[in-house]
Image (tube, rainbow, N blue to C red):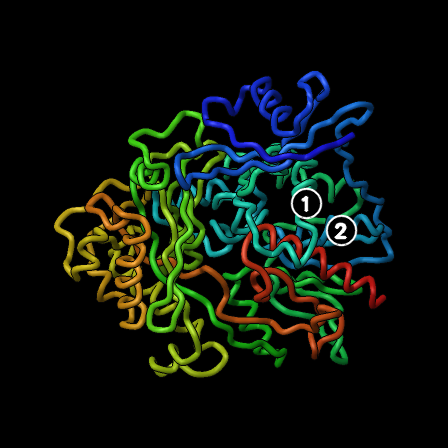
Amino acid sequence: MIKEAEIFVNPDKINDHEYQKYILAKKMQVQVEDIHSFKITRKSIDARKHPVFRLRIAAFMGNDKPEVFTPIEFKEAEKNKRVVIVGAGPAGMFAALRILELGIKPIIVDRGKNVRDRRRDLRAIQQDHIVDPDSNYCFGEGGAGTYSDGKLYTRSVKRGNVDRILKLLVQHGAQEEILIDAHPHIGSNNLPKVVESIRETILKHGGEIHFESKVTDFIVENNTIRGVIVNEKDEFLGDSVILATGHSARDIYYLLHKKNILIEQKPFAMGVRIEHPQALIDSIQYRTEKRHENLPASSYNLACQVDERGVYSFCMCPGGIIVPASTDKNELVLNGMSISRRDSPFANSGIVVSIEERDWKKYNQSGVFAGLALQQSIERRAFEAGGRTQTAPAQRVTDFVDRKVSSSLPETSYIPGVTSAALHDLFPGFIGKRLRRSLIVFNKKMKGFISEEAQILAAETRTSSPIRIPRDKETFEHPQIKGLYPVGEGAGYAGGIMSAAIDGERAVDAMMVKR
């Protein structure tokens, strides 16, 4: 017999399995010896009164046994059936895995380098302020998520099988804890190994992966895509093309527009990265001066409405660092990341304002690239304010609210460094005003959020793409071009590792139904 129950455990008992078994038996009103084994199926933290672990547990009694993890099997790819995938991020890689399950050959082309070689270019941008436009925190094997945290939480549970994606990650080396954590996280130190393992699976079963292969043209005949041209000379042909290029591949949007392939404007969000000492966030969230050693670095999720517009925290990184996510030498873009231990003394998060069509019209921007132009203008202003390097313009949160330039700045996790700047003047009024007012609201929800120890850095602009590549809701196919399947964040249909991976898989399944 299998019974499930929920128990609450203090931090000092989270590793005491005998104690947990005792509490479980008491909750189920059975004898301890009746439970021969148990398995935690969900773990989260409840800090409403004092921090405790909330565990959902399956207890096994009699002849019942825990389910054994069964890996997903992949077929050897048929050479005469092939699908070209543009982009080796989560949407592209999980599309490739799904294609291999069906015995079809995936051919991935990616402008960036493999996950290991990317590290040299990340070091160059961090230490030398040198931006490689094709190999950076956004571009390369694994996509933007590989070296920017590896958070796996998603609200897209209705879009696809979240557990299936998590199991595939575990199958390729991720820690099994992601299967039970309410907010699973792999970490930027472990995710590259998982990405390499996925690559090995794709190659082992007959797929192809070509790095440093930038798509420069689409091969289209009679409104049907036949393949792509990379690096202006090499052709890759397939029965279909999955376009999974990520939210920063702006050249793909321009190429689609040039070839009269329909793209659309869409709302997005922009703002700043806010950074606090992790100990301060812990004291607010856990209501204690010092976090228990068994508790993880605490996080937060904040949102409010200011003048009929949403302002919210984005990609919160407890125990993390801020990184430069620029993809052009004349821009400054920020993101956040954490390693698996989340042991940095800092916590950071995006605080962003929703951007709509009426906003870019105010700044005389029009046409399908209007939102993109506004995004670029703020990235360039941040670059100028930082001294035309990857040094980030920054301001104490207290000074930002009071519209004062900071005479000094607190310590930061941001390796390229910070410089004091008037961020209250860097952003257009409709963004700056809402950011200031939202911080006051957030401080009421988390007393101490506005602090002399906290600072904001500019600019957080790549929460999502300002462009959508349209597709049919059922077939996932572009309405104009047969065989073209836009997926993931770059197409405007995902927001993070999990939702992008799900979207890639769903596109393949839709493609197979049509076949």
The numbered disc on residue 191 is none
Q: Quadrant of residue 377?
A: bottom left
Amino acid at dot 2: Arg
Q: Is 402 situated above or below 477?
A: above
Residue 266 lies, in percent from the top left, at 51, 73
Amino acid at dot 1: Asp
Q: Is 8 situated above or below 347?
A: above
Nearer to me, 115 or 317: 317
In the rendered image, is residue 330 in sight? no
Q: Quadrant of residue 170?
A: top right
The numbered disc on residue 98 is 2
Q: Residue furthest front?
A: 29
Nearer to me, 100 or 33: 33
Separation (CA) of disc 1 from disc 2:
15 Å
Question: Residue, x 52% and y 71% (percent of image)?
Answer: 467
Quadrant of the drawing holding the N terminus? top right
Question: Residue, x 76% and y 51% (percent of image)?
Answer: 98
Residue 402 lies, in percent from the top left, at 16, 60
Query: Circle 1: is it few (<14), some (14-19), or many (20+) Cα within 10 Å?
Result: few
Residue 128 lies, in percent from the top left, at 34, 44
Nearer to me, 213 or 99: 99
Question: Residue, x 41% and y 68% (percent of image)?
Answer: 354
Q: Earlier in the sequence, mark 1 or mark 2?
A: 2
Q: Secondary structure at mark 1?
A: helix
In the rendered image, is residue 384 in sight? yes
Number of numbered discs: 2
The numbered disc on residue 163 is 1
Q: Is 197 situated above or below 144?
A: above
Residue 144 lies, in percent from the top left, at 52, 51
Badge nearest the viewer, 1 or 2: 1
Query: Circle 2: is it few (<14), some (14-19), or many (20+) Cα within 10 Å?
Result: many
